[in-house]
Image (cartoon, grey):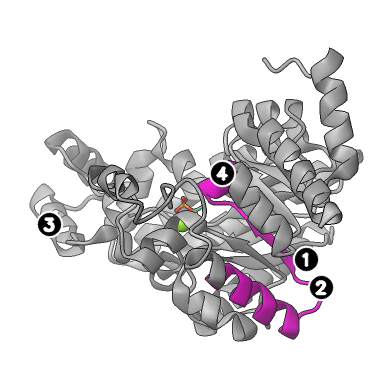
């Protein structure tokens, strides 16, 4: 457990007085969320919801949902997931108290949800009533040769809107339930991943807004909430001015933005990047420290274009770079509002943000 008492706590207190950037954490489990709060995170900047679907009692329903080709089958599977997803969010809201939570709707490459073994297939066959042969055929149809550039992120929300509808419902019902207890008023920030064009966001924001409206009408409780998007594709960075019309916040997904800007797979980069570093091609691993002339330039362009459309747009970063001191300094200079990093890097980010502010003031 973090011990932020004594000298270390005092040092952190000095850092907090100087820094301009807020520091949030990437967390989706109660343990991570608690750790983040103990380390001084001022909220959750990225709650990745896909991991919640891999639990043993959930994954058969998820597979059934993906493989059912009729809406009724999908909705039945989702109805089983709704209460579990709702309690995930209630727990996170309780731990965070007044702190904000940015909850990202589903963003796995689809293949992670496909059945891999005969046992997986048998589980889905039982739940869906479809034959094993039919399920194998459907899974083969959904197979992709390049899943990270394929059917993931908001593309899933466009093709399977019931999934995002269920998740949005779970978020708003959880927020309403927590606010009914009378102590907290969560203001959920619903985040749409992997947007490339404002048209995707327009469709999905409408779906989220309509779901919020339904939940508020059903429960008689109305809450504030925000809808925003990740900027993690070069096209989205360039189209940020249009995207900001429907986005109240941007969170830079610099893991994917690095992958797609440099054209280097984030999963295999380690195979040749060390040789590149030796030759000074990239001074530092661009997946650790923001490539400032490339990816950073896109961050600056998107921030500028987003702000031009919506002066008060909230800007953050939630890729791994959010916990890297040189990247934190870049975010400070680019005028972002917050960085979000792994819970264990929160103290580093707090210090780095203060050092960036002090260096900036000296200059
Ligand atoms: C990112 O792409 O930077 C990001 C935070 O999303 P994920 O790592 O989940 O793709
Ligand atoms: Mg991403």
Mark 4 — residue?
Answer: 85
**Residue 308 in picture, x, y percent from top left:** 74, 84
For the residues marked 3 and 4, what is the alpha-carbon distance in whole angstroms? 29 Å
Q: Earlier in the sequence, mark 1 or mark 3?
A: 3
Q: Earlier in the sequence, mark 4 or mark 2?
A: 4
Please tell me which residue lies in front, 314 or 287.
287
Please tell me which residue lies in front, 146 or 106.
146
Q: Is residue 322 magenta?
A: yes
Q: Is mark 4 within 8 Å of ligand 1?
A: no
Mark 3 — residue?
Answer: 134
**Residue 232 in picture, x, y percent from top left:** 49, 65
Mark 2 — residue?
Answer: 312
Please tell me which residue lies in front, 199 or 22.
22
Q: Is residue 308 magenta?
A: yes
For the residues marked 1 and 4, what is the alpha-carbon distance in whole angstroms? 21 Å
| SS at mark 4 in the image | helix
Horizontal arrangement in the rendering, residue 155 relative to residue 32 (left or right): left
Vertical relation: 53 (above or below) 213: above
């Amino acid at each position: 457990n973090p011990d932020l008492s004594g000298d270390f706590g005092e040092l952190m207190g000095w850092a907090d007085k100087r820094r301009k950037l807020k520091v949030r954490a990437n967390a989706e489990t109660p343990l991570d969320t608690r750790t983040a709060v103990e380390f001084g995170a001022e909220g959750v900047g990225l709650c990745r919801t896909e991991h919640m679907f891999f639990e043993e009692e959930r994954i058969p329903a998820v597979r059934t949902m993906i493989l059912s080709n009729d809406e009724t089958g999908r909705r039945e599977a989702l109805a089983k997931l709704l209460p579990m997803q709702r309690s995930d969010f209630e727990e996170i809201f309780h731990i965070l108290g007044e702190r904000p939570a940015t909850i990202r709707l589903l963003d796995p490459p689809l293949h992670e949800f496909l059945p891999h073994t005969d046992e997986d297939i048998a589980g889905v066959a039982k739940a869906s009533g479809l034959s094993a042969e039919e399920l194998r055929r459907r899974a083969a149809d959904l197979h992709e040769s390049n899943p990270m550039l394929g059917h993931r992120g908001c593309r899933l929300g466009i093709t399977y809107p019931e999934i995002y509808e269920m998740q949005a419902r779970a978020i708003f019902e959880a927020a309403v339930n927590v606010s009914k207890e009378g102590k907290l008023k969560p203001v959920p920030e619903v985040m749409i991943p992997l947007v490339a064009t404002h048209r995707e966001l327009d469709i999905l924001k409408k779906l989220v807004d309509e779901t919020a409206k339904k939940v508020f009408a059903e429960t008689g409780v109305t809450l504030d909430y925000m809808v925003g998007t990740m900027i993690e594709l070069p096209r989205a960075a360039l189209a940020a001015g249009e995207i900001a019309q429907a986005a109240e916040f941007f969170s830079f997904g610099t893991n994917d933005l690095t992958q797609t800007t440099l054209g280097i797979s984030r999963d295999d980069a380690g195979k040749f990047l060390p040789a590149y570093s030796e030759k000074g091609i990239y001074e530092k691993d661009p997946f650790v420290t923001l490539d400032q002339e490339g990816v950073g330039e896109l961050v600056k362009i998107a921030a500028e274009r987003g702000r031009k459309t919506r002066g008060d747009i909230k800007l953050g970063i939630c890729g791994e770079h959010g916990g890297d001191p040189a990247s934190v300094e870049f975010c400070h200079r680019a005028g972002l509002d917050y960085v979000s990093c792994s819970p264990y890097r929160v103290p580093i980010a707090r210090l780095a943000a203060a050092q960036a502010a002090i260096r900036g003031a000296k200059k």
